Amino acid sequence: MDNLKKTPLFNIYKKYNGKVIDFAGWALPVQFESIISEHEAVRNAAGLFDVSHMGEITVKGKEAFLFFQNLLTNDLSKLKEKQVFYTFMCNYDGGVVDDLLVYKYSDDYFYLVVNAANIEKDYKWMKDNKGVYEVEIENISDEVAELAIQGPKAEEILQKLTDTDLSEIKFFYFKDNVKISGIECLVSRTGYTGEDGFEIYMPNKYAVELWEKIIEVGKEYGLKPAGLGARDTLRFEAGLPLYGNELSEEITPLEAGFEFFVKFDKGNFIGKDALLKQKEEGLKHKIVGFEMIDNGIPRHGYEVRADNQKIGYVTTGYFSPTLKKNIGLALIDSKHAQLGNQIEIVIRNKPLKALIISKNFYKKNYRK
Amino acid sequence: MEILEGLYYSKDHEWVKVEGDKAYIGITDYAQHSLGNIVYVELPEVGAELSAGDVLGVVESVKAASDVYTPVDGKVLEVNNAIVDDPSLVNNDPYGSWMALVELKDKSQLDNLMTAEEYKKFLDEE
């Protein structure tokens, strides 16, 4: 564990019985109490996550807007000041370099939040595609800590620690210089669990203090510290993709089922030609949701079969803690991808029956 | 971590409780604790003839699937379907949640396993 990167909260995991694992080169807690109890806390009350491993990159300059219109699949002209959006950054083949959040301060100042495993790659991709655009790109990941408080009680808990009226921060908007327990933070109503909640960014040195404050105030509401295990089961139930599973350099946003975040009518952007071609020719394979008919838990990487042939593989699978069912996401041949189709998941060499269902397994509980 | 006296233990964290020529086999408290919430259990067929080191069954936590090996040769006489219906029993009562009852083929194999005291020492060193 010594060679792993650590967040500013590393030394506090032990106090909460955190079980530390290697996640993309980071020493992070997979769980504190148990994945299921943490998962349930987020669905029913609140959970607090250390997500300081996430990367933050700022882009400033008078051509920042143009730079991003070319680099990202979503349409920046629709993004208002203090609004956040979800977007893909694609390669020229339409594959996904990363999926990220863009926070807009103004047309010449944007704040990006990217996946931990992709920080260096993204930073390089941006610099390589900077071209003649007048922008300044800065990777500030090492200076920024991030906490996520998620769940139906998140607002009530966080409100106890600030004078800012949090109800004024709408879904996918943010506010800067919010004083939480005296600490200046950037706060957005965003998350990765399918529940209402906030993501809070602050300088590293305040992370422990803020974590402890939120835990203390949240206790009576049922808030629990939550690890990466619950983070993954929560996002999965809500149909949210994980880079490396449902998205990759080889899987396009269209195949993943997220065309909503690809705006073909906004003008040129990197990957547009390939994506347009794919859209016109039809998708060869795509991500579907499925539910096991036979008893078995699908796992990442398991083979998917139909008509005695391999048609794809499982990208994520779990026993769903909320739905109490064995469900999964799989990348499969499009001709087998209709809802209601029966497929087989090969579990320990046994093909077990499963049914294709909508991948929005859990209805998102956002406060919009 | 609870370790019961009178049982035999394997390095893979299975326990064996001998009763005459038969033995109950399950996973230890340490094993259930390291796995976390157990959400699925698969057991062998009754009548299966197993050799030491063969897969006895599978336990799956939220995160991962793990094989459970039989530490001794034996024919499966009974399996504990209660833990298939409610896998969390293995977390709550690992020494009561036996997976299979086997007919022992060779009791001398028990000498290769650890006593409670030896297993405790083994865990301390892990």
Image (tube, coloured by chain):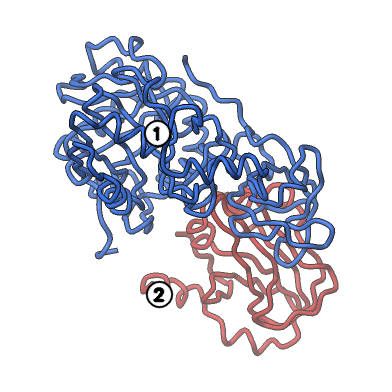
> The residue marked by circle 2 belongs to what chain?
B
* Camera-side residue of B77 and A189: A189
Picture quadrant of residue A310: bottom right
> x, y (%) of residue A254?
58, 40
A172 relative to A357 in the view: left or right: left
Secondary structure of the residue carrying tag 2 is helix
Which residue was labeled with disc 2? Answer: B121
Residue at the spot of label 1: A224
Chain A visual colour: blue
Query: According to the colouring, which chain is red?
Result: B
Question: Which is nearer the eye, A272 or B46?
Answer: A272
Query: For this rendering, which residue is in front, A83 or A23?
Result: A83
Tell me residue A171's x, y (percent). Answer: 41, 18
Q: Position of residue B27 (x, y in %)?
A: 59, 64
Q: Secondary structure at mark 1?
A: strand
Q: Going 69% across and 86% down the picture, which residue do you hit? A: B107
The span from disc 1 to disc 2 (Cα, nearest Å) is 34 Å
Amino acid of disc 1: Lys
Q: Quadrant of residue A154?
A: top left
